[in-house]
Image (cartoon, rainbow, N blue to C red):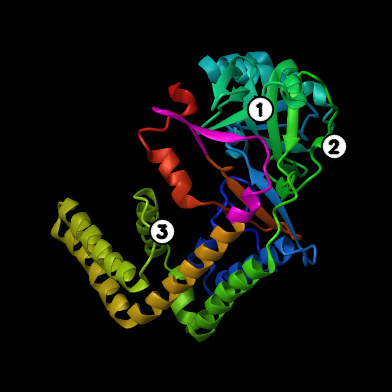
Amino acid sequence: MLKNFLTEAKEGKNVHLEHIEDMVFNEGVTGTRNAILFLRNLRNMLSGSSPGSLDITTKWDGAPAVFAGVDPADGVFFVAKKGLFNADPQIYKTEEDIKAKLSGELQEKFLVALREFKKLGIKSGVYQGDLMFTKSDLSKEKIKGEDYLTFQPNTIVYAVPAASPLAAKIRKASIGVVWHTTYTGKTIQDMKASFGKGIVNKMQSVPSVWMDDATYKDVSGTATFTKEETANLTAILSQAGKIFQKLPAAALNDIAGKEEFLIRLKAFNNSKVRQGKTIKNARKHVSELVKYFREYYEKEAAKRKSEKGKQSQLDKMKDLMVYFDKNEKDLVKIYEVVMLLTSAKGMIVSKLNQAGSIPTFLRTTSGFRVTDQEGYVAIDKVGGAVKLIDRMEFSRANFSPDVIKGWQK
């Protein structure tokens, strides 16, 4: 059984999902075991032998996040941003609320959201989605010689063939949204998130709202592993399992239990992703990690004015160097597991991408470039969820100066 892998898990809010390979660091032995089992179940699903234990949703690159529902405290319909779950909830029940608290383009979008989402017949509960467009965001563009109706809420350009029935529906809409999470509870603060499909079926269909849920759809019928691909993926997961079984439990659990260490370790890993560098040699990566920690605490010590403050940081560094000396071999093995899980995830994401959907592109300074969906979310039957994303691809897209984002057009 998987626990709910959300940063805000204890509150049960869908604020931030974790990458599947980070389960190794976040949850130690339990997380590593569950990551391997999760990937095995995904393999089974995509090889046609799924026990039906997982659902997949597509991550749409929408912005901003939008909530719509009924406040259980007074039965009044509202829309909201992520501030919905603040101690002082940011809820907009009237146009006056929106005009008082928002400005510019954000105000315009939420005014449309309030007017249009009221028509969906939501009687209870709260739904979270990604806002894809309002009327002014739609454009006619020619890409690689073809005419498209496009919208670009964030980094990815969604391009619908101009002559298609889908384009006709979108043209009639005042707003577009993809729903992915349902919340239920007796109060806003007590609400718990559940992922999954069928959200659109719970709402009234109106021409002025184009909406979809994030349920993964294999519209091309090609997202199935061949026997050879299944065998290759099985071999990778088996190798990860063998290394995992030989690792001392303490080596994994110690990382998850050291909060400051875990934050800095993940910061180092993420810095490599932003640089477009994959882990190709676990031993070299650990050596660079040790150097990173030493330099980090030396810089922190230099910032402190008092000798006591400086020594506190140097003591932390000394303790960590002792830790690395004792655990370097195990850390190398842990990163070997992470490398294998990342490789397995890559095979699965690549296969999921073959399903096809709305064509997706990146808008660059030299024209449009084909790209894949942002990624996917895998959900187990008890509500646990993790991200499946090609981190290198979308790091390049997000940090490349050649890629023009939605707000830069």
- Tags 1 and 2 touching, CB below 8 Å: no
Does 362 appear in magenta?
yes
Does 129 appear in magenta?
no
Please name the residue that numbered disc 1 is placed on: 160
Residue at (37%, 32%) from the top-left corner?
402
Query: How many numbered marks, from 0 up?
Result: 3
**N-terminal label among 1 and 3:** 1
Horizontal and vertical percent position of residue 396: 41, 43
In the image: residue 153, left or right of residue 185: left
Q: How would you rate the neighbour count of disc 3 (Cα within 10 Å): few for under 14, some for 14-19, many for 20 or more?
A: some
In the image: residue 267, left or right of residue 174: left
Residue at (23%, 65%) from the top-left corner?
294
In the picture, the disc for residue 389 is none
Q: Amino acid at mark 1?
A: Val
Local secondary structure at mark 2: helix
Q: CA distance from mark 2 to mark 3?
A: 39 Å
Bounds of the magenta segment: 349-370
Q: Nearer the viewer, mark 1 or mark 2?
A: 1
Local secondary structure at mark 3: helix
Position of 40 relative to 353 (above/below) = below
**N-terminal label among 2 and 3:** 2
Please name the residue that numbered disc 2 is placed on: 201
In the image: residue 170, left or right of residue 326: right
In the picture, the disc for residue 266 is 3
